[in-house]
Image (cartoon, rainbow, N blue to C red):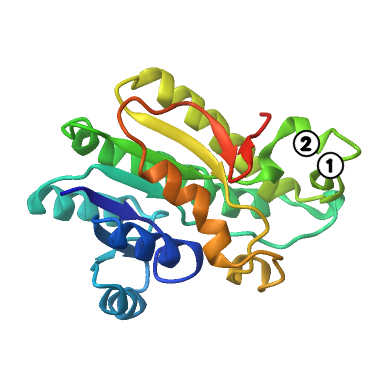
């Protein structure tokens, strides 16, 4: 049995990813910083709720202890993220950047640091880091790419940082499959449901990479349509 933990899984892409992986036979922990919302989502899915605030070291450590005591972990999906205010570049402050990075970047590092010892014990460990096309330096500098017209300095740069984390963790842990994915512009709370894709469409690449076999790719960046340029 494959055991999977998804952060930010009580709604949106995380919830849909959990639903699909449960259907594929995974035992899933629904990570949620709100205990009641996590319980409600887990009950609806047939999953296990896990109180988890990725901005809090103690919360992450407690979650790791819970998962370890229950038998360990095979797949980690780092999905939880915030968008922050979409302002002009000149209006972005260090405080805005710190808030986004604390969740989107440092949250991933907290999760990796706490759960790597469990993943190393798995016969087929997988990590999926949910990134964004807005994190691509190539697309951000391509005038023909829509990503170049979105001035998401804080959010976009946080996802660029996630991509670098993916590369370095994949290099350091070659026995694991560690990849970044772009779910695309999906209608979720993150964008006030303005996205043009459904959560079913957005979750496709997350699920695909969560189901990787040991011989699968690692250290990559992809969307449902194929590889993305860094």
> So how many labels did they put on this image?
2
- Mark 2 nearby-residue class (10 Å; few <14, some 14–19, many ≥20): some
In this view, the residue in front, 73 or 2, is 2
Snapshot quadrant of residue 128: top left
Percent of width and height locating residue 34: 36, 73
In the image, taking residue 184 as reference, residue 1 lies left or right, namely left
Q: Is residue 74 left or right of residue 221?
A: left
Could you say whether the residue bearing mark 2 is in a helix, strand or loop? helix
Instruction: Name the residue nearer the viewer: 79 or 227.
Output: 227
**Mark 2 touching mark 1, by CB under 8 A?**
yes
Residue most extreme to the right: 143
Residue pictured at 63% horizontal, 62% vertical: 186
Image vertical order of residue 173 relative to residue 76, above or below: above
**Which type of secondary structure does the marked residue at label 1 adopt?**
loop
Find residue 222 and report its horizontal and vertical position in percent. 58, 37
Upstream in sequence: badge 2 or badge 1: 2
Q: Position of residue 57 (x, y in %)?
A: 33, 50
Residue 153 in the image: state x and y as whole percent.
75, 46
Q: Which residue is at 66% across, 29% downward?
A: 230
Q: Is residue 45 visible?
A: yes
Neighbours of disc 1 within 10 Å: few (<14), some (14-19), many (20+): few
What residue did someone put label 2 on?
139
Say which residue label 1 marks: 145
């Amino acid at each position: 049995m494959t055991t999977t933990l998804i952060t930010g899984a009580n709604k949106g892409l995380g919830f849909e990813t959990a639903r699909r992986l449960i259907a594929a036979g995974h035992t899933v922990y629904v990570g949620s910083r709100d205990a009641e919302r996590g319980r409600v989502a887990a009950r609806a899915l047939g999953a296990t709720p896990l109180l988890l605030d990725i901005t809090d070291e103690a919360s992450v450590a407690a979650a790791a202890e819970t998962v370890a005591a229950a038998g360990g972990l095979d797949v980690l999906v780092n999905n939880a993220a915030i968008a922050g205010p979409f302002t002009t570049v000149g209006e972005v402050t260090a405080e805005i950047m710190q808030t986004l990075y604390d969740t989107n970047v440092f949250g991933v590092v907290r999760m990796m640091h706490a759960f790597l010892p469990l993943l190393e014990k798995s016969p087929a460990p997988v990590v999926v880091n949910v990134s964004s096309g807005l994190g691509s330096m190539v697309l951000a500098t391509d005038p023909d790419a829509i990503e170049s017209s979105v001035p998401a300095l804080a959010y976009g740069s946080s996802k660029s940082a996630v991509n670098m984390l993916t590369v370095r963790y994949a290099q350091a842990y070659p026995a694991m499959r560690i990849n970044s994915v772009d779910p695309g512009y999906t209608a979720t709370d993150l964008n006030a449901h303005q996205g043009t894709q459904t959560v079913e469409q957005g979750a496709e690449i997350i699920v695909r990479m969560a189901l990787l076999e040991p011989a699968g790719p690692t250290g990559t960046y992809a969307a449902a349509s194929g590889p993305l340029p860094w």
